[in-house]
Image (cartoon, helix red, strand yellow):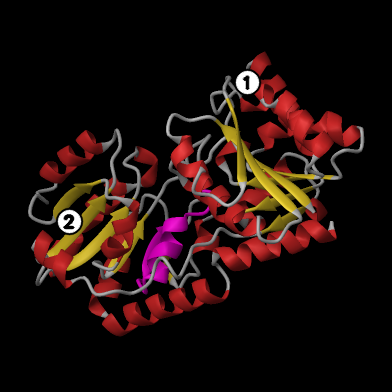
Amino acid sequence: MRLLLISQDFPPDIGGIQTYCFELADRFYKNNEDFAVLAPKKKTDQDVDLSLPYKVHRVLSSNALLPYTSLPVIKSLTRNKYDTTFHAQWQTVLPALPNRKKGYIKRVFVAAHGRELLFNPFNNDSFAGRRYVAYRRWLLSQVDHFFAVSRYTANLLMNEGVSEDRITVMPNGTNPGEFYPTETSELRNKLDLNSKRIIMTITRLVPRKGVDNVLSAMRSVIKKYDNALYLIVGGGNDLERLESLVSEFNLNNNVRFLGKVPHSKVKSYYNLCEVFVMTPRTEPLNIEGFGIVYLEANACGKPVIGSTSGGITDAIIDGKTGLLVDEDNPEQLADAILQLLDDSKLAEKLGKQGRERVIKETNWDTIAHNIHEKMLSV
């Protein structure tokens, strides 16, 4: 197979889909007759591209316009070199269709994450909004096969008219060789965390991620553990509101915002905590399609707590790798946090089983292999 991976999101940009594409690309190039990536051009992309063992074709384009600006490049590449396309988003399928019709492309595959199947740039009830939905449904109907990151995302596809036999649920993964249990005494001393019971979230600070829900739960947690400390790693436009909530809830001694940390140091921060928690909420046009952070924390041997929003129920096996709670339910969340702080054996067991799952199933080597094998069989 001569495979071209096409994505609107790719490093040096940072995010879940960027990680998904980067990790799959690292494996795909080893297992195909020929392999390359097509992505938008970025200011610092040469630093990334020169370090990679495969070719990255860059198109001078914004991420949003790539489905249109990439047409001549995809036409040329698939006519002369690549016979299969793997699209990280459904929007980039359109430029591939003429060459498939001419026989240059044999198969078109698409990953499905979640938000892109709900997003509409127009009002859903407007004429333009209805036309956008009709266009998306038509384009989805042209795809040979989909790889949905969760059962929830698979259901979104079926709601768009995609038959179940054209969907394979293939979860996200992580790298247990990058995320693993490690000693953290130096970092604990640096942050003055000795004697603290650490609860942690690593996320973008936006309302949908539910950090405010954890802050509300912390009011109950500190009644039993006044040495409980909630560490929040990440930045975003919700920071000011969250800081106000910390003051309002009298949590100034029990919450710290650590800001963004370099990716190379994220493993150490996961290893600081006793419990990793992130409880996103479902918004009308935005959901958590999976949640790679839960796997990263599990890979570090940590128990995780998540909400039942979107595809998180595939990221966390309730009672085995972590605990699931209802959305926007601080009382239930506080009970879950206290359950793990009270029972160190249970916390250790969930974290251990979480890492075992990553090693056996939800790692990028296994995920990429399974996707590749499925593409060959379709």
Question: Quarter of the image holding residue 106?
Answer: top right
Q: Is residue 198 magenta?
A: no
Residue under the image location 44 percent in, 41 percent down: 47
- Up-down: is 251 above or below 301? above
* Residue 285 location (% of width, % of height): 53, 34
The three-letter code of the residue at mark 2 reads: Arg
Direction from residue 109 to residue 360 in the image, left or right:
left
Given residues 238 and 33, the one toward you in this image is 33
Residue that protrudes farthest toward the top in the picture: 127
Residue 299: say if magenta: yes
Look at the image and give the residue range highlighted in magenta. Answer: 287-306
Question: What is the x, y in percent for residue 225?
Answer: 13, 69
Q: CA distance from mark 2 to mark 1?
A: 41 Å
Of the 4 image quadrants, the one containing the C terminus is bottom right
Q: Which residue is mark 2?
A: 219
Residue 332 in view: no
Q: Tell me which amino acid carries mark 1.
A: Asp
Residue that badge 1 annotates: 125
Image height check: is 344 above or below 50?
below
- State which quadrant residue 302 falls in: bottom left
Badge 2 crowding class, 10 Å Cα cut-off, few under 14, some 14 to 19, many 20 or more, is some
